[in-house]
Amino acid sequence: MIINLEVEDRNGETQTVELPTEVNLNLMEALKASGYNILATCGGMALCATCHVQVLKGLDQLPAAQNEELDMLDTLPDAGFDSRLACQLKVNESLDGIKVKIRGDEH
């Protein structure tokens, strides 16, 4: 299955990204593979927040954040109710149609 999501980069440019659900990636890995500059310093362990995204559309269709993700988001001065760590979102049909804005540090 192919899902589509909108991604707004740090410059405010929005693109639609098509992702296959059978590749078993998380959103952070998929965004990096799509050419987005995401540090992913901790390798997807919810320890660095360099993959912080703001969910602009579709927040209600995502699975709830787990404690490790919530703890890391609590350390970010710019995190809001619609913040998620892309490394904690599996690429599956729950991401179809969402829109995210990349917020994490790029250096």
Image (cartoon, grey):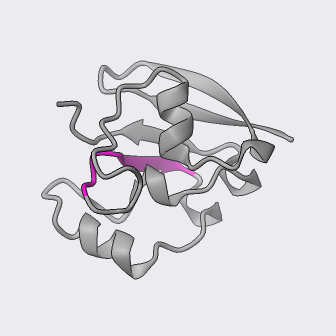
Camera-side residue of 59 and 25: 25
The mark tally for this picture is 0
> Is residue 53 located in the magenta-colored stretch of the structure?
yes
**What quarter of the picture does the C terminus occupy?**
top left
Could you say where residue 59 lies in the image, as x and y percent from the top left?
54, 59
Q: In the image, residue 58 lies at what x, y percent? A: 59, 53
Quarter holding residue 23: top right
- The extreme bottom residue here reads 67
- Where does residue 78 sit, x and y in percent of width and height? 18, 53
Secondary structure character of the magenta stretch overall? strand
Which span is picked out in magenta? 48-57
Going 68% across and 43% down the picture, which residue do you hit? 97
Tell me if residue 29 is in the magenta stretch: no
Q: Is residue 100 above or below residue 66?
A: above
Which residue is painted at 76% across and 53% down in the image? Answer: 93
Q: Is residue 62 left or right of residue 97?
A: left
Which residue is at the far left? 77
Direction from residue 88 to residue 46 in the image, left or right: left
Q: Residue at x 35, y 65 (%)?
A: 81
